Amino acid sequence: MADKAQLQEAIKTQGEVVRKLKSEKASKEQIDDEVAKLLQLKAQLGGDEGKHVFVLKTAKGTRDYNPKQMAIREKVFNIIVSCFKRHGAETIDTPVFELKETLTGKYGEDSKLIYDLKDQGGELLSLRYDLTVPFARYLALNKITNIKRYHIAKVYRRDNPAMTRGRYREFYQCDFDIAGQYDAMIPDAECLKIVYEILNELDLGDFRIKVNDRRILDGMFAVCGVPDEKFRTICSTVDKLDKTAWEDVRKEMVNEKGLSEDVADRIGAYVSMQGGQDLAERLLQDPKLSQNKQACAGLTDMKLLFSYLELFQVTDKVVFDLSLARGLDYYTGVIYEAVLSQTIPAPVCTPTEQNGADEAGVSVGSVAGGGRYDGLVGMFDPKGRKVPCVGVSIGIERIFSIMEQKAEASSVKVRTTETQVLVASAQKNLLEERLKLTSELWNAGIKAEVLYKKNPKLLSQLQHCEETGIPLVAILGEQELKDGVVKLRNVASREEVDVPRADLVDEIKTRTL
Amino acid sequence: MADKAQLQEAIKTQGEVVRKLKSEKASKEQIDDEVAKLLQLKAQLGGDEGKHVFVLKTAKGTRDYNPKQMAIREKVFNIIVSCFKRHGAETIDTPVFELKETLTGKYGEDSKLIYDLKDQGGELLSLRYDLTVPFARYLALNKITNIKRYHIAKVYRRDNPAMTRGRYREFYQCDFDIAGQYDAMIPDAECLKIVYEILNELDLGDFRIKVNDRRILDGMFAVCGVPDEKFRTICSTVDKLDKTAWEDVRKEMVNEKGLSEDVADRIGAYVSMQGGQDLAERLLQDPKLSQNKQACAGLTDMKLLFSYLELFQVTDKVVFDLSLARGLDYYTGVIYEAVLSQTIPAPVCTPTEQNGADEAGVSVGSVAGGGRYDGLVGMFDPKGRKVPCVGVSIGIERIFSIMEQKAEASSVKVRTTETQVLVASAQKNLLEERLKLTSELWNAGIKAEVLYKKNPKLLSQLQHCEETGIPLVAILGEQELKDGVVKLRNVASREEVDVPRADLVDEIKTRTL
């Protein structure tokens, strides 16, 4: 606990930071951040500073999911998990934090985005940054050499959030991976089939899956005359081609990365190429590429991959694209990325987030990506034993954003409960009878609600049904109790019919199939 | 990054710590902890210290879930979620971390168990300690005054782990809460009904749900002569009665907490009482308790609660027990706790964990608990507006432990996939035909697998089915392809039958209903 004088000093300093930012007309987000810190400091001081200053918010870059968002999330997960299960996958889970050193050296420059836990004595821990590194750690720890598994869980990155675009600091990843020594390209093809199936079923409009291979990229760089030590950095420049024009990418290569114009232009000729199996065949005849061992291995596998994709009937959406590079260091073979064709309408932006043209009518971009990483598990194994892996990660947060906007735009109301029937009464003093009937329905497996009031008005009971989409009302009255029946009302049509109490469960089941 | 000299110094110091512990014959767990720290330090030094020293483990007190454990977890969650949905609950989710101050002042002494995140600039954050405080924060932030929601998520406590007993530092909570201003005891009764249903369906053997009320406890302490300022501390002493004999509890009251023997004995007379509605009625006539306003309010509500429990047909398992106290400060009314009657057999203990008789043949104890907390949301609301809440938390980790042990003991194999059919071949060169058929099955919604080998042996294909529990094999051969059929084999019975390719999907569906 900081002492009081220190705190007051910190508050003074922080107050100046805020004033300075305001006078400089800094961005609202920046100012909000610093104001939040100021309020936190004041809250720590508490007590004699007068009122309790309390910041009521979630942590920066995170959000709560309300019931409506959860209903959409559940729907999306169901589609994805069904697909993973259809392909025979098991599932695992790992802790939200790992030993810090487990994550060290896996993410290159992005390591600065890792959340560390405070050293409270004991081990040094960090929140997981993705699910792939914990998966590799899991395989090495348990000496597993064969598994097809999916893992859906949240990961953490201290990145700049852009919440309206579905970019958060806490977000879901949805990974499917196949580990094991198998014949070439069969598991790789299944991963692409899975992406295809999921994007189809989610009904997000047209999409394209770009495919390339790290070995083809490396071979291409070699034959173009890129020095070995510049492969990775040129790779990340090439990676910008999905958002940036060739002219600008070329400039970066020449001016910043120090390639000669000739070399850049040779790269330019290759990375403009797109095609299918035919392109792989043509490049295998390319006088320069065909001389490079790496490139030939990649191209031969690409040909094979496309022959399997043909059998899986997914070649209409898959493109062999030499400009696809992908950032992560650990890929060793095939890489791929799925992009939606549609441009989603500009969401309602808060002023904080509306900082540039790229926020308005933004193209949704990548919604899935992955590739082969044959070396990662070996980094964890004490004897360096390798377990070849290939996998795909579904970019679920962007998909949530799109689905939420679709739900918002649609007239169909999203239900957040599955209640089949409300047990109601029009008369007073029937609480006990309502509770008794509700309990009977629960015991019979019917999803039933009852208002927690002694004597609710019938109107408010019906309104509850309208608001939450409950389709049926089971109405009890003195007469019904005497006759051994329940009045079953269809909320939409307002039709009512007396149902013998013994038949009620079956009647509700039939009507809410 | 610490510099090298500092690190070497730290390694030296830590080495001495380890040597000292070993010479003192400290517990294996303690030594392991310090050795792990030493290895971490050495790993940080890395490079020129020779080999890479890498600690391959999960963080202390955490575990991975393997596919078998996940299958059990999914089964348990399905039962629980079905129950919550049957009662018309929505679901929400909140971030894994909250602003540190959101958690401050909610957990009393246990606050020291909160995991803090490192200050990497920006807000001060902590991992959530339970789901109740984030729920209250959520209600206040979104100005929600009415909701029935469940939330299943992991929470974090830097407690002493006892993994074989299902006590972890990362563990699931499974909460159901009803927020809103309603007529007395109706939502409270529903929470108890839910505990009853879930424990019944999970089939964990006999159980008992103890019920009490904070107001009854407070009233009882008052009429026994406990000074106001000692209510909470005496409450936590009473809470030990489930594990400790009255004589020892009495000693603590008198010797440590400074009660007179008379006062302790008066408490002793009350806390030995157990019963149902009748006990509430009797205590309402008690010459002393009936004079206390708090106690009367609690007893009147208890009577009402039991009348509703009667309607819900759960009174066979619910006991009004005056010794139930529960630790948390925020309860304001009814409190309850469910305990299993069975004693689970001693699990296989690692030497580290086997430190005392309480590990062997341990009684499972509390598997659910909760109560009414009408003041918590008001602590977050800027205007202090109250939202009455009542809820229950299912102690899911203990339940997992029991279910895992049951599965271990049972001869029935836990399946970790849902695959209906393996597409196989007895002959060579049929990979393409296998892939094509598998793809057809996937497209028709059949859960199908195919081995990722060009020419797998039939035996290894059948073995894969035996090992993973796949019930059917669709076998392709030259003859079958010519005849337009597939040989469908039942793995268990070894029966084979030729099925026309056009009928295959229906046949598989029928056989794997």
Image (cartoon, coloured by chain):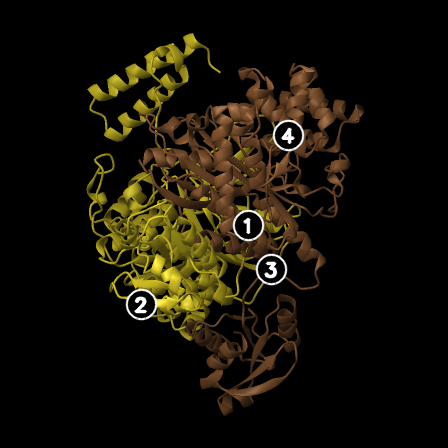
Chain colours: A yellow, B brown
CA gap, disc 4 and disc 3: 57 Å
Residue A18 in the image: state x and y as whole percent.
27, 19
Q: Is residue B22 above or below residue A217?
A: above
Which of the chains bears the disc numbered 4? B
Label 2: which secondary element: strand
Q: Which residue is identified by label 4?
A: B271
Label 3: which secondary element: loop
Left or right, B107 with reference to A384: left
Splitting the image into 4 quarters, where does residue B141 fall?
top left
Residue B314: mark in rendering: 1
- Discs 4, 1: same chain: yes
Q: Is residue A375 above or below residue B284?
A: below
- Amino acid type for the residue under numbered disc 2: Val
Badge 3 crowding class, 10 Å Cα cut-off, few under 14, some 14 to 19, many 20 or more, is some
Q: Which residue is identified by label 3?
A: A146
Taking the spot 51% from the left edge, 23% from the top edge, the residue there is B292
In this rendered view, identify the residue nearer to me: B11 or B298.
B298
Q: Which residue is identified by label 2?
A: A497
Which of the chains bears the disc numbered 3? A
Badge 2 crowding class, 10 Å Cα cut-off, few under 14, some 14 to 19, many 20 or more, is few
Badge 1 crowding class, 10 Å Cα cut-off, few under 14, some 14 to 19, many 20 or more, is some
